[in-house]
Amino acid sequence: MNPESDSLDTLDDAVAAQAFRRLIRHLRHREDAQNVDLMGLAGFCRNCLSDWVEEAGGLSKDAARETVYGMPYAEWKAHHQGDATPEQLERMKASVAKNAPKNEAV
């Protein structure tokens, strides 16, 4: 795809913001979807989203994570995050390897 003709860049900011908020609310609702599984399938997770919010908005890491998780990260982790299995970690490692640097910057 040619980055100069990417229709994503012409998407109205209000529409993009609404879609982003819907994604975050969906992930908050689906607390059964573990970050390690999201990483294993898509190469990103809630922590990635919070890092992107931190970078884009100049927030602290803690503030960005609370924005994404809807609560302090330590609280979410204690209530919703289980231990990763070796298989989950291997899938995550293979998936993250597919992330090309061109996909990180925009």
Image: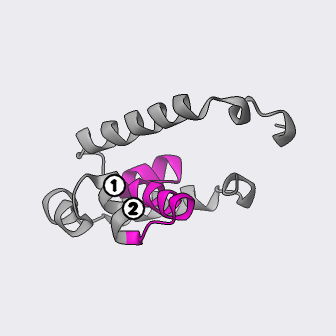
Label 1 with label 2: CB-CB less than 8 Å: yes
Give the residue pinned by disc 2.
64
Residue type beneath disc 2: Ala
Question: What residue is at 30 percent from the left and 46 percent from the top?
Answer: 33
Question: What residue is at 43 percent from the left and 59 percent from the top?
Answer: 50
Front in this rendered view, residue 27 or 50: 50
Give the residue pinned by disc 1.
67
Front in this rendered view, residue 91 or 106: 106
What SS does tag 2 mark?
Answer: helix
Residue 47, percent across and down? 41, 61
Please tell me how crowded label 2 is: few (under 14), some (14-19), or many (20+) other residues with Cα within 10 Å.
many
Image position of 27 with respect to 7: above or below: below
Please tell me how crowded label 1 is: few (under 14), some (14-19), or many (20+) other residues with Cα within 10 Å.
some
Residue 81, percent across and down? 22, 60
Q: CA distance from mark 1 to mark 2?
A: 5 Å
Q: What span is in magenta?
A: 35-61
- Is residue 70 visible to the viewer in this orientation of the structure? yes
Residue 65, percent across and down? 35, 62
